[in-house]
Image (tube, rainbow, N blue to C red):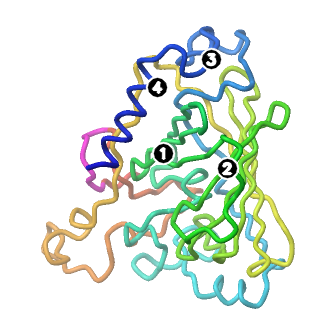
Amino acid sequence: MKKCVEISSVIAVLFLSPTTFAQNPNTRNGRGGNTQTADPHDLSGIWLGGEGGDRNNSPETLMTPWGKAKFDSYKPSFGPRAVPGGLGNDPLSNCDPLGVPRIITAHPSGENRIQLLQTPGRLLEFIEYGHIWRDIWTDGRPLPEKPDPSWLGYAIGKWEGDEFLVNSAGFNDRTWLDSFGDPHSDEMRLEERYRRVDHNTLTIRITIHDPKAYLKDWDLPLTVYHLDPDPNSKIPEFFCVPSEVWGPQGVRANGVIETQPLIANRVFTQDNAKWLFWSAREVGVGRLRQHY
């Protein structure tokens, strides 16, 4: 309850105080199109897409023996190593948090939404999938030497020219880097570079530093977002709900007993756009629908 009160207070400050952060009025809510100028230091808004970042880019040749063993043990539902439906072990199939960077670069429906809110001392990254906040501290504090492992890690940010640089650490090793089963360890550190290219375009360049899993640093494919043009847009609820994936005692509506959550019972492919995903946008609840 205390955490909810704190978040509500932050939201109230953001939306009720005109002095919370400077914003060019010509860039708000995506109004005006590409011809308008945009302050490159103004990242605020709801951003749609996340294209490119979750392409298959597995650096198998860069993996350490530890990393390769993890990679071989993962059974993804995407890409060249995709296994038949129900046989994979993607953490997504258990409704586990996707973690960083995957929560930024991937989304079960194929399109992500994030909202960036700039406040004194931190940037808040509000992410559609899971309806979660990620704190990126901008008050000058250093990264903790030994942060407690967590799903989202611990992040700090600062401006380098027109790029917003985020460094993060303190991740657990229970998530995948992407939908293709690329691993990471609890020693991983991330470097994210956010750049507002123009009024409507935000790019994110992510570099993986994980000497336990990889022989050298490597970059994920560039992730691209576009400003939501709807001035009344908001981030909808979008949860992975185990009880709605499994049904009562693991029994589907048609009476078939499942041994894996439904979200894992299809080989997901990006080529033919076959997805099982939470259709909260259409019906407002976390029910699975099959799209062809």
Closer to the N terminus: mark 2 or mark 3? 3
> Residue 20: within the magenta?
no
Residue 290 at what x, y percent from top left? Answer: 34, 55
Closer mark to the observer between disc 1 and disc 2: 2
Classify 10 Å Cα crowding around label 1: few (below 14), some (14-19), many (20 and above). many
Judge from the rendering whether residue 207 lies leftward or rightward of residue 171; answer left or right.
right
Report, in whole angstroms, how far the alpha carbon at label 4 lies from the one at label 3. Answer: 11 Å
Report, in whole angstroms, how far the alpha carbon at label 2 lies from the one at label 3. Answer: 20 Å
Closer to the N terminus: mark 1 or mark 2? 1
Viewer-proximal residue among 66 and 289: 66
- At x 67%, y 52%, the residue is 53
Residue 143 at what x, y percent from top left? Answer: 69, 58
Q: Amino acid at mark 4?
A: Leu
Judge from the rendering whether residue 197 lies leftward or rightward of residue 83; answer left or right.
right
Which residue is under mark 2?
156
Closer to the N terminus: mark 4 or mark 1? 4
Per the image, label 4 sits on a secondary structure element best described as helix
- At x 67%, y 58%, the residue is 168
Report, in whole angstroms, how far the alpha carbon at label 3 lies from the one at label 1. Answer: 22 Å
- At x 33%, y 79%, the residue is 260
Which residue is under mark 1?
127
The span picked out in magenta is 282-288
Per the image, label 2 sits on a secondary structure element best described as strand
Q: Amino acid at mark 2?
A: Ile
> Residue 287: within the magenta?
yes
Mark count: 4
Q: Amino acid at mark 1?
A: Ile
